[in-house]
Image (cartoon, rainbow, N blue to C red):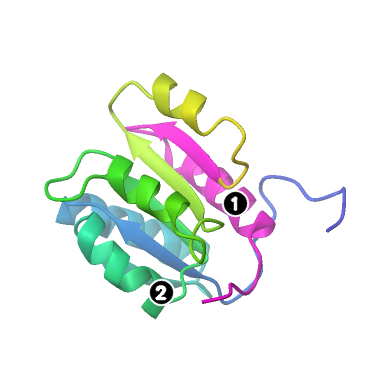
Amino acid sequence: MSDSITLNDPPPRGRTILLIEDSATVRRILRRLFETEMPDAKIIEAPDGRAALREVTRCRADLIITDLQMPGMDGRSFIGTLRANQALRKKSVLALSSDELSDLRRLYAGDAGILFLPKPSNPDEILRSARALLRAAPTAFAF
């Protein structure tokens, strides 16, 4: 990777993004954002953490964007499950929440593969964060 990469540089082509959000409206907005700004990315959707766990290995997601407040398995539990699983622990995660995030930032302070943004965040910040995580993500994971 070059030192000249900026946060606005595009990620590698053909990556898969898993959107986890219980609100169909928010999922639709995020999908449109990524389809417009990263047209080579494949977008997969899940309404909660349980559905996302079924999808994450099937679709081989390079980036997971998750809400933290969801019914069923919430984003906190989902991230904990990912990080506890040897095959999935290196997945890149962008977590969005209207909750206070300081406890999660402390918990995952040494984990470069996870970023937290407040909800709502502006689209440019979401894209910058997603691009940074995608550039840093390995292109293949062992399953």
Query: What residue appears at the point 55 percent right and 72 percent down from the top-left corner?
Result: 15
**Kind of residue indicated by mark 2:** Thr
Query: Is there CB contact under 8 Å for labels 1 and 2?
Result: no
Query: What residue appears at the point 57 percent right and 30 percent down from the top-left corner?
Result: 109
Query: What residue appears at the point 44 percent right and 52 percent down from the top-left corner?
Result: 84
Neighbour tally class for label 2: few under 14, some 14-19, many 20 plus, Cα within 10 Å: few
Q: Which of marks 1 and 2 is in front?
A: 2
Residue 130 placement (x, y as % from top left): 53, 51
Quadrant that contains the N terminus: bottom right
Q: Which of 24 and 88 is in front in this view?
A: 88
Q: Does the magenta stretch include residue 137?
A: yes
List the residue tagged with mark 1: 133
* Image quadrant assignment for residue 43: bottom left
**Kind of residue indicated by mark 1:** Leu
Q: Which of 74 and 28 is in front in this view?
A: 74
Residue 128 placement (x, y as % from top left): 58, 45
Neighbour tally class for label 1: few under 14, some 14-19, many 20 plus, Cα within 10 Å: many
List the residue tagged with mark 2: 57
Gap in angstroms between the C-alphas marked 1 and 2: 18 Å
Secondary structure category for the residue under label 2: helix
